[in-house]
Amino acid sequence: MNRSGLTWIILLLVLTGGMITGLLVGDGDLSDLALRETYLKLRLWRLGNAGLAGAALATGGVLVQGLFRNPLASPSILGTTAGASLGGMVVLSLWNVLLAGSMPAWLPAELLLPVGCLLGAWLALMLLMTVTGRDASVITVLLTGFILSSLFLSVGGLLTSFASEDFELGRAIVAFTLRGVEAKGRHHLALAVPMVVLGTAVAMSWARHLDALLTGEDEARSIGVDVVAVRRWAIIWTATLTAAAVAIGGNISFVGLMVPHALRPFVGVEHRQLMPAAFLGGAAFVIWVDILVRVVPTRGHLPLGVVTRLVGAPIFLYLLARAAREGRMA
């Protein structure tokens, strides 16, 4: 068996192990026959949301790395995750302040949350590409993404501060941004599944074009690739995947950086191999991180995004330092 085939088997085993463990670990005693079904359902929705968020972010990471031809890029580093989070917060705020009394009861805020996340993620990527241009250096792209992330997070913090004066709105925003997958249920999962499935399927159809783009825009044009269309659709589907992940998992960082980078030595750089591998790897990674969040003894709630940042930030610094040593920061 070759290296790539073994990697697929390991990914499936790790994902399956995480799904089984995720059903067995958590608050509540499964030996209580009266509540066992309830506990299992809650863990199942949490498991599905965690896996779907991780799969979406890792797949989005592959897309944005192909778009910028840079393995250091990811939705969180480029400001897309923060933009999606801000978009969701704006929708929740507008719903509570302007629309709650005038909208029908059958239209809950959860239905509009992914829309706000999508618009925020799309805005972030469009701003990034407008500011940096197509020939910007790696350091320019990373610095611009950092500034955009800081801007979006600051505006989000301002909204959270204002929302604290309204109990219901404050609770909704905190649940959305900090509590992650445990605060989401089957309705959130049902809304996110079409976005992730459609985004991944369409992104896979552009795999050969993204492979050509890795060689450079001029080379891609010379073999008939519509570079403008590839860039436009990569932005759209990266934003879609990131928005779905944020809508069900909150602000989860660095998954889109770590997972593709870890898998690329084993499955190669071709997108038709790397993208589905990242989908499985991202799902498995976030599921296991969520299990860790459940078992770590803390007096309060430990946000899922905090753990991914604790793991991802040192890895990103290492990759950044290695790229600088190899002269790839120009």
Image: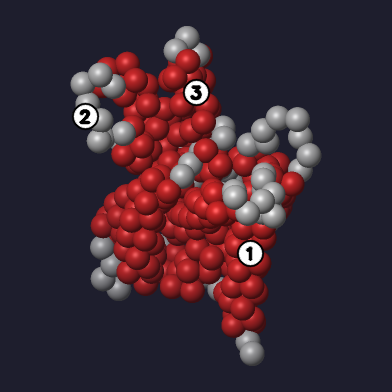
> Mark 1–mark 3 contact, CB under 8 Å?
no
Label number found at residue 171:
3
The amino acid at mark 1 is Ile
Task: Give the farthest residue toward the top.
Answer: 165
Classify 32 as above or below 182.
below
Tell me the residue that label 1 is attached to.
20
For badge 2, the amino acid type reads Pro
**Residue 244 placed where, x, y %?**
41, 47
**Nearest to the observer: residue 263 or residue 109:** 109
Per the model, the C-alpha gap separating discs 1 and 3 is: 31 Å
Assess disc 3: are there few (<14), some (14-19) or many (≥20) residues with their C-alpha within 10 Å of its C-alpha: few
Task: Name the side, left or right, on which 134 lies relative to 149.
Answer: left
In percent of width and height, residue 191 lies at 35, 48
Amino acid residing under circle 3: Arg
Disc 2: which residue: 104
Q: CA distance from mark 1 to mark 2?
A: 39 Å
In the picture shown, does residue 155 fall above or below 149? Answer: above
Position in image of residue 279 (x %, y %): 50, 63
Residue reaching furthest front?
A: 34
Q: Is residue 279 left or right of residue 93?
A: right
The answer to which of 159 and 22 lies nearer the viewer is 22
Residue drawn at x 37%, y 72% as measured from the top left: 208
Residue at disc 2, secondary structure: loop
* Nearer-the-camera pick, 243 or 72: 243
Give the image quarter of residue 108.
Answer: top left
Q: Earlier in the sequence, mark 1 or mark 3?
A: 1
